[in-house]
Image (cartoon, rainbow, N blue to C red):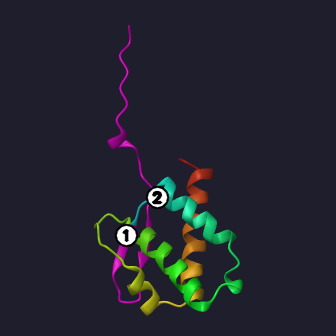
Amino acid sequence: MANMNFDFNKIQRSFFKTTLKDGRELVVKMPMKKTFEKITAAQEMDLEEMSVADAMDTLGAICAEVLSNNLNKEKITMKYMTDNYDTEEMGEFIKGFMNFVKGVKADPN
């Protein structure tokens, strides 16, 4: 009888290296289901129909959650995001991050 073993700790991981405006470098991990669902829902929203404040808060919260899921366990707040980044910058970050996630999903090797 053959013995088999699987170790989740030995899976080769993919990371999204991100440099913030203040020069900090974060190595962001793949999102968990809850975060992925929030990103997907935000991409389907029409931000132009939202107030500027609501759009900023929505994008800032999502970016903060994604960026806080990093190897250094550094917490990024929604306030930091909305104080330092505009909607275009945050939208581009989300788009780039989702392209990364989709690319890893399409080519898991």
Residue nearest the observer in this picture, 71 or 34: 34
Tell me what residue is drawn at x 65 percent, y 70 percent. Answer: 43
| Vertical relation: 106 (above or below) 43 | above
Q: Which residue is mark 1?
A: 68
Disc 1 is placed on an element classified as helix
Image location of residue 56, percent across then percent down? 54, 86
| Vertical relation: 27 (above or below) 61 | above
Q: Which residue is mark 2?
A: 30
Q: Which residues are magenta?
A: 1-27
Tell me what residue is drawn at x 32 percent, y 43 percent. Answer: 9
Give the dominant element type of the magenta stretch: helix, strand or loop: loop
Q: Quadrant of residue 88?
A: bottom right
Residue 24 drawn in magenta: yes
Tag in front: 1 or 2: 1
Residue type highlighted by circle 1: Ser
Residue nearest the observer in this picture, 12 or 52: 52
Tell me what residue is drawn at x 31 percent, y 73 percent. Answer: 75
Tell me what residue is drawn at x 61 percent, y 71 percent. Answer: 42
Q: Residues within 10 Å of mark 1 (few under 14, many from 20)?
A: some
Residue 82 drawn in magenta: no
The single residue placed furthest to the top in the displayed view is 1
Image location of residue 91, percent across then percent down? 59, 80
Sequence order check, earlier mark of 1 and 2: 2
Image location of residue 21, percent across then percent down? 41, 89
